[in-house]
Amino acid sequence: MAQVELHIELLDFSQNALSIIYAACRQCYSASFAGQIFAEGLKDLVKQEEFVRQVVSSGHKSPLEHVKFTFAIEGVSRALTHQLVRHRIASYSQQSQRYVKESDFDYIIPPSIEADEEMKKEYVNTMREIQKSYNCLLKAFENKGKKGESANQDARFVLPQASETKIVVTMNCRELEHFFQERCCARAQWEIRRLAEEMLKICKQKLPAVFNNSGAKCVAFGYCPEGVKFTCKKYPLKK
Ligand SMILES: Cc1cc2nc3c(=O)[nH]c(=O)nc-3n(C[C@H](O)[C@H](O)[C@H](O)COP(=O)(O)OP(=O)(O)OC[C@H]3O[C@@H](n4cnc5c(N)ncnc54)[C@H](O)[C@@H]3O)c2cc1C
């Protein structure tokens, strides 16, 4: 068992993403067929980029739903993925604690605990104790003739939220924008915020026309909607 860090890879995103959004936007206002608009649009990516930027900033967001990004994520805690999967307009495939035995589980250490020697010692010792208990339960199940997922599924109840997990996530661009608004906010919990910020960097690089002005809600609104108690004061409060 070991402490591990966040690792993200972009597995794929829609081919010709910009042209798809462009054709979808133009279809709304054109007598031509989107197939033709798409083919013609491929010849002038600069024009498309300009058009898509304008449409996105005008708030016409449904064309963004036609393009999706798929990320492979590891080195995150189960506490993080519990929050992540609350975002419903997305697809998820997560490593199972039934089918994958956790007899040598890795874990995440929050920076606040990492920074304090005594707290870190306590934390790491607890992880070791949990590991012992988990392995002990597996052994007891084995003695009763239970193996594999039927043993794992019950032994896992003692595992911590800190347990490392791996997950594949697919979101369309509209949902990604919403996810960034919620989770890049200073109010969001540090681990999911860090994940959102890394995903945003990748999206900005791949599709700047859509994501250049994405981020926490305040970035889009120009003010902070969180109220006086929660504002990070980067933007003025909503009057
Ligand atoms: C700082 C912070 C603190 C939080 N604290 C808590 C907490 O203490 N407890 C808790 O339970 N959760 C908490 N959450 C989670 C939060 O309540 C949402 O579940 C999560 O952010 C997903 O947001 P969403 O529902 O807008 O997004 P998604 O599920 O991604 O949906 C995107 C949008 O689609 C629309 N939509 C989706 N499904 C429906 C539907 N069924 N009906 C109507 N419209 C729909 C909505 O407009 C929604 O905003 C917190 C989130 C944040 C960012």
Image: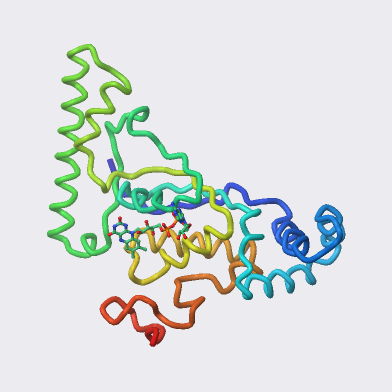
Residue 112 drawn at (x, y percent): 23, 64
Task: Indicate the quadrant of ligand 1 in the picture.
Answer: bottom left
What residue lies at 32% left-to-right and 79% top-to-bottom? Answer: 227
Residue 209 drawn at (x, y percent): 66, 69
Is 16 positioned to the left or the right of 37 in the image? left
Residue 147 drawn at (x, y percent): 28, 17
Q: Quadrant of the C terminus?
A: bottom left
Is 117 positioned to the left or the right of 186 in the image? left
Q: Determine which quarter of the picture holds residue 67.
A: bottom right
Q: Quadrant of the N terminus?
A: top left
Relative vertical location of residue 88 with respect to residue 196 in this rendering, above or below: above
Relative vertical location of residue 114 with respect to residue 222 in this rendering, above or below: above
The residue at the far top in this view is 145
Q: Nearer the viewer, residue 110 or 18?
A: 18
What residue lies at 53% left-to-right and 48% top-to-bottom? Answer: 170
Residue 149 drawn at (x, y percent): 32, 23
